Image (cartoon, helix red, strand yellow):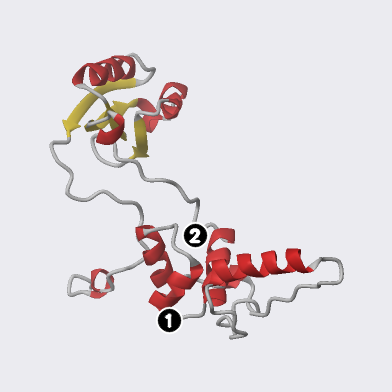
Amino acid sequence: MKIIISVSHLNIIQYLAIMAERIAEYGNDMSTEKTDDIRQRPSKERTVDAMDRKILGALTQDATRSYADLAKEVGLSAPAVHERVKRLRATGVIKRTVAEIDGAAVGKGFMAFIHVEASGWGKTSDIAQLTEYPEVEEIHTVTGDSGVILKVRVESTVAMEGFLWRLYNSTGVHNTRTYVVLSTHLERGAQAEITPEFATGDHVK
């Protein structure tokens, strides 16, 4: 990846400042290495490949890492990693970059999953308005006895009772079952890596 900067309209101080920013972003790897043919192929034609999964796996652990640091881990140049991350963002594979908050540290140490039996899989305005509560972290429509599953995190049992009271009074809600979380052993978002054996094991006829 070549970085070309015209200095005809910049003074030398501005030029050095730009170069310093580039070096900070890419590290010392300012090579002209080809970026895995990314630019030559339209983004819509590309699928997530093994290298993309490596980069995504590293980013899910720490999204603040520099391109130079990521490049060392996955074995590409920093500009190549930059191009891939830019494409992954543009195509929606990386939806957004957010901060992961410790619930207990912000006073929300009481978490529960609530199964809701509701008319029409809970597709009512009242259920939709639950997204306005910061305590509601996930809403899923599902198969089975429950039409909707909520993941809710509050500060206390009293707060949970208040939330359930409002939920009971929502249009279309017939019944709820609340499963209180005692301890959490794993909590994470979608991961890029896959386990091939799940799709190719002996269970597949």
The local crowd at label 2, few if under 14, some if 14 to 19, many if 20 or more residues have their Cα within 10 Å, is: some
Q: Where is residue 85 drawn, in percent x and y?
A: 53, 66
Residue drawn at x 59%, y 79% as measured from the top left: 30
Asked whether, in this view, residue 180 is left or right of residue 196, the answer is: left
Asked whether, in this view, residue 119 is left or right of residue 17, the answer is: left
Corner quadrant of residue 106: top left
Q: Is residue 165 above or below residue 142?
A: above
Residue drawn at x 49%, y 59% as measured from the top left: 93
Disc number lying in front (2 or 1): 1
The answer to whether marks 2 and 1 mark residues whose Cβ atoms lie closer than 8 Å is no
Q: Amino acid at mark 2?
A: Val
Q: Quadrant of the C terminus?
A: bottom left
Q: Is residue 8 above or below residue 121?
A: below
Residue drawn at x 57%, y 80% as measured from the top left: 35
Q: Where is residue 66 drawn, in percent x and y?
A: 48, 65
Q: Where is residue 119 drawn, in percent x and y?
A: 36, 26
Q: CA distance from mark 2 to mark 1?
A: 21 Å
Mark number, residue 93: 2
Corner quadrant of residue 141: top left
Q: Residue furthest right?
A: 8
Corner quadrant of residue 121: top left
What residue does disc 1 label? 75
Q: Is residue 144 above or below residue 42?
A: above
Q: Amino acid at mark 1?
A: Gly
Of residue 166 and residue 11, the one placed in the foreground of this image is: 11
Of residue 85 and residue 121, the one placed in the foreground of this image is: 85
The tag earlier along the polypeptide, 2 or 1, is 1
Instruction: Determine whether the residue tagged by mark 1 lies in a helix, strand or loop.
Output: loop
